[in-house]
Image (tube, rainbow, N blue to C red):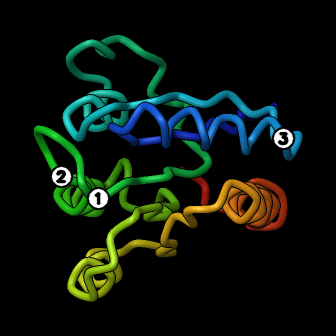
Amino acid sequence: MNKKIILLVEDNPDDELLAIRALKKNNISNEVVVARDGVEALDYLFGTGAHAGRDMSVMPQIILLDLKLPKIDGLEVLRRLRNDERTKLLPVVVLTSSREEQDLTESYSLGANSYIRKPVNFAQFTEAIRQLGLYWLVLNESPPI
């Protein structure tokens, strides 16, 4: 059976913890791989750096991508994903606190599948994660990678 991994790309430890707590609260028990900056996310996805030698046949079912990241920002991560045959079809949900319209527009222009602003309230955040999990991990049919 294919493992449905969630790649959480998040540099804020509080938001990382909140996302993992929300997943657990909603009984989403998928393995969560956390990348804390854009370089780490790309290393994981392309099997380079600290992730050299990982099984590249196992790709995330969904990528939850923050935009404001150190080293390489989320928009550049998305750009590189979409420009590579191995990752261009992976579902990417931008999960960000950015309220900038330019971020929204550019995310979709670069091929984001969804754009969600992080709710400040934990109950709302938990509900958003529940709906994300239900849709992307249960209902959505992903292309074969």
**Residue sitting at the far left:** 71
Residue 67: mark:
1
Indicate the quadrant where residue 21 lies.
top right
Depicted 114 relative to depicted 93: above or below: below
**Relative depth, front residue between 100 and 50:** 100
Q: Is residue 74 toward the left or the right of residue 120 in the image?
A: left
Describe the element under mark 2 as helix, strand or loop. loop
**Mark 2 is on which residue type?**
Asp
Q: Which residue is mark 3?
A: 25
Q: Front-most of 2 and 80? A: 80
The 10 Å Cα crowd at callout 1, few under 14, some 14 to 19, many 20 or more, is many
Residues packed near mark 2 inside 10 Å, few (<14), some (14 to 19) or many (20 plus): some
Is 87 displayed left or right of 122 in the figure? left
- Where is residue 127 drawn, in percent x and y? 77, 63
- Which amino acid type corresponds to the residue marked 3 in the rendered image? Lys
Do residues under tags 1 and 2 come within 8 Å of each other at their CB atoms? yes
The residue shown at (79%, 35%) is: 24
Q: Which residue was labeled with disc 2?
A: 73
